[in-house]
Amino acid sequence: MGQQAAPVEETLDPQDWSAMRALGHRMVDELCDYLSTVRERRPWTSVPPATRARFEQPLPTSPRDPAEIFNEFRAHVLPYPSGNIHPRFWGFVMGTGTPLAALAEMLAAGLNSNVSGFDDAATLVEAQVVAWLRESLFFPSASSGLLVSGGSMANLVGLAVARNSNAGFDVRAKGVQAAPRPLTLYASVETHNSVRKAVETLGLGCEALRLVPVDAEYRIDLNALRAALAADRVAGHRPFCIVGNAGTVNTGASDDLHALADLARDERLWLHVDGAFGALASWSPALRARVAGLERADSLAFDLHKWGYVPYEAGCVLVRDAARQRMSFDVAAAYLAPARGGLAPEGPKLSHLGPQLSRGFRALKVWMALQEAGFDKLGRLIQQNVAQAAYLAELVRAEPELELGAPVPLNVVCFRYRDAARALDEAALDALNAELLVRLHEDGIAVPTYTRLRGRYLLRVAITNHRSRRADFELLAREVVRLGRELLASRG
Ligand SMILES: Cc1ncc(COP(=O)(O)O)c(C=O)c1O
């Protein structure tokens, strides 16, 4: 028999490691240049049509030089970010990130660990991070926790555990359609829409989520909550959970979490707290009282990619009773059964605490970021943002052509431009402020976003930005007045 030629075997590793190394150095250099000069650029610029067209290329079927690909990134991606790393970005509730955590992402991708609970260091890093977060939020050391993609996923996981633990029957086996009595849960009308998404995803139907009115401070009305619970019990429903807010998306309001914890205890309900950003106010001793009681939650959802200043994606869910979290997601399989030793021995599996099996190494950037700053400094930065919100509110109060739209309990300021003559009606004010917001974005001034409260259109500034300075808020207030006058004049 003649000798067969060995097949050509390929790899995705570079042929020229020194060229890859040089490109990597260039990427790091350029990233540091970019981040250190961020203030000099506009917060946001619309992607021009020619650039949009660059992203309609045919399927790439053959290799391309990595340096060329990076150049394309520099030319067509880098100039058009959403802008949330800029000091004057205060839209939605977005995070700023840090340079070290960005580099950690590169290292994490290099290791490419699958953090589902093996005998490896990445799993220990995540366990360490969760232990720090638990301690920083005054959760018991026996509670469990998991890093997830963000607040939406943390709410989904927390509410899944709530449903499975407190439905009164075996939901995992029978499904929600087997409920002898319709399950209901309770949250204020100010609750983030990710809670509704979670409720729908969990098969409960959004009508099961009873939206309770709020008081003048946008906190859940406890009497209305008690009345809703009583009415549902009389009607034969089975209330199983209350969702409290530590920092609502619209105004930063926090419910009376101690009162909710007392009520949940008395009514045998699960208390889930959505503390997407507000929970981290606990990191500041000066602010802790504003979200007091969150440590009594059965489950707590929060983000690190918002007020933790860590780059996307990084959220966390903590569950007081670790067994309940495991009992919600633990599914045995022969190919995942623990061995007597080796890489996958007996022991806690992170994949048993949430829906994901394969999980990325998002813990590395969190581990680095938390140590680089330390919790004391992070607490001070959070306090700095709250002081900036109070300062902006002061500027608004001092300016007759600006009007505050809601109390400012934390880091969110809602306000609007008002004509000095008070000649415009509500509809005209809504339209004028909506136009004004677009001008702020498109003129490259700043990026607040907006909301509606009690029917009014309001500019909304949510401050989770470690790069913002008081002068940025002075500029915002000044520019809103200038643009307001200009738009008013152009209306004739
Ligand atoms: C109060 C609140 N809950 C939940 C979320 C959803 O978090 P994420 O965007 O990380 O999924 C947000 C996002 O802004 C929020 O403000």
Image (cartoon, rainbow, N blue to C red):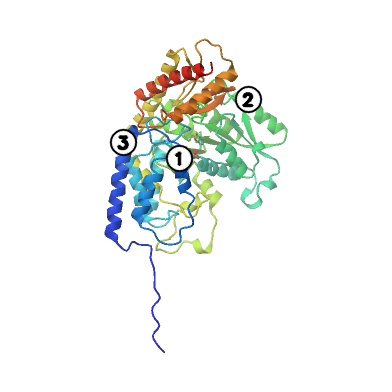
Q: Amino acid at mark 2?
A: Ala
Return the mark for residue 224: 2
Dot 2 surroundings within 10 Å: few (below 14), some, or many (20 or more)? some
Cα distance between the residues tagged 1 and 2: 50 Å
Return the mark for residue 413: none
Dot 2 falls on a residue whose secondary structure is helix
Near-viewer residue (430 or 107): 430
- Circles 2, 3 touching at the beta carbon (< 8 Å): no
Q: Which residue is mark 1?
A: 48
Q: Is residue 121 visible?
A: no
> Which badge, 2 or 3, is on the more N-terminal residue?
3
Dot 1 surroundings within 10 Å: few (below 14), some, or many (20 or more)? few
Cα distance between the residues tagged 3 and 1: 22 Å
Q: Amino acid at mark 3?
A: Thr
Dot 1 falls on a residue whose secondary structure is loop
Q: Is residue 481 left or right of residue 157?
A: left
> Which badge, 1 or 2, is on the more N-terminal residue?
1
Q: Nearer the viewer, mark 3 or mark 1?
A: 1
Return the mark for residue 37: 3
Q: Amino acid at mark 1?
A: Pro
**Placement of 49 over or under 67, stated as above or below:** above
Q: Is residue 395 visible?
A: yes
Give the image location of residue 280, x and y in percent.
42, 33
> Which badge, 3 or 1, is on the more N-terminal residue?
3
Q: Nearer the viewer, mark 2 or mark 3?
A: 3
Cα distance between the residues tagged 2 and 3: 51 Å
Near-viewer residue (96 or 210): 96
